[in-house]
Image (spheres, coloured by chain):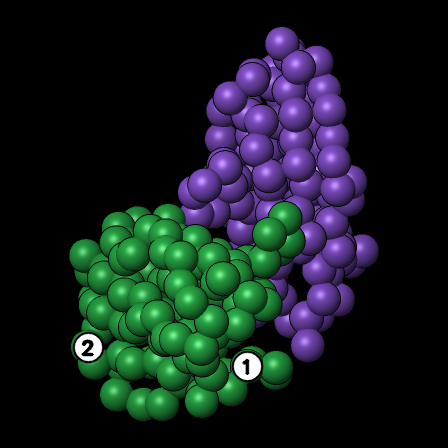
Amino acid sequence: GENVEQHPSTLSVQEGDSAVIKCTYSDSASNYFPWYKQELGKGPQLIIDIRSNVGEKKDQRIAVTLNKTAKHFSLHITETQPEDSAVYFCAASTGGYQKVTFGTGTKLQVIP
Amino acid sequence: SAVISQKPSRDICQRGTSLTIQCQVDSQVTMMFWYRQQPGQSLTLIATANQGSEATYESGFVIDKFPISRPNLTFSTLTVSNMSPEDSSIYLCSVDWTGGVSTNYGYTFGSGTRLTVV
């Protein structure tokens, strides 16, 4: 089955700096890669996703890149703010009602 | 995306008892997924529930322990049976909201049920 590895497990940045979280996946059939933000006491919230026919996707301060050849994808958050502090999960799926396999999570702390 | 209501939001239960968690979606969805998230850990899929058929369980999870119902396209329940302290976790419902199109629109999660077994 699919295996998703995520690094780093914790990340501290100063407010205004950029944060990068990296993931690798094992199943070459995976074609959908969502990123989730989970705040304390809440369920994961989808913040951005990318499909395998796209190499990069941006949404304001958040961007995701995908390298299918190397089987890795990354989340980039620019101009970080204290409210970005949360646990971030990457995930992979083969799509079409198939299950999503999650990475181990990155606890991001943005220091004011 | 779909809006999910999950109940209860939290509960404290005695060992040996059972708890049923409800998941209500405001749109008709094909698949509903139940996940477990142990404290400080990632999400692990328990089972996939398709309306009108038996749930499909992942390795390590069995129907006797986690029976699931999926009576219609907007509702599902997960029961945690004969609970022990090791079952203390957050249980999350998720849907593959397709909006009637056979491509992923993104997976939406409920807010979770925080279960403590004493």
* Quarter assignment of residue B93: bottom left
Q: Nearer the viewer, residue B32 or B43?
A: B43
Q: Is residue B87 above or below residue B12?
A: below
Q: Which of B46/B38 is in front?
A: B38
| Residue shown at 61% from the left, 82% from the top | B60
Give the side of residue B47 with respect to residue A12, left or right.
left
Count of marks placed on residues: 2
**Looking at the colours in the rendered structure, which chain would you say is drawn in green?**
B
Crowdedness of circle 1 by 10 Å Cα count: few (<14), some, many (20+)? some
Q: Earlier in the sequence, mark 2 or mark 1?
A: 1
Q: Quadrant of residue A75?
A: top right
The quarter holding residue A63 reads: top right
Horizontal side of B4 relative to B118 (left or right) equals: left
The residue singled out by tag 1 in the image is: B61
Specify the amino acid type for callout 1: Phe
* Residue A30 coordinates in the image, percent (x, y): 62, 66
Q: Colour of chain A?
A: purple
Instruction: Give me the C-alpha separation between circle 2 and circle 1.
Output: 23 Å
Task: Describe residue A42's horizontal placement relative to residue A68 as left or right.
Answer: left
Percent position of residue A38, x then y: 51, 41
Q: Quadrant of the C terminus of chain A?
A: top right
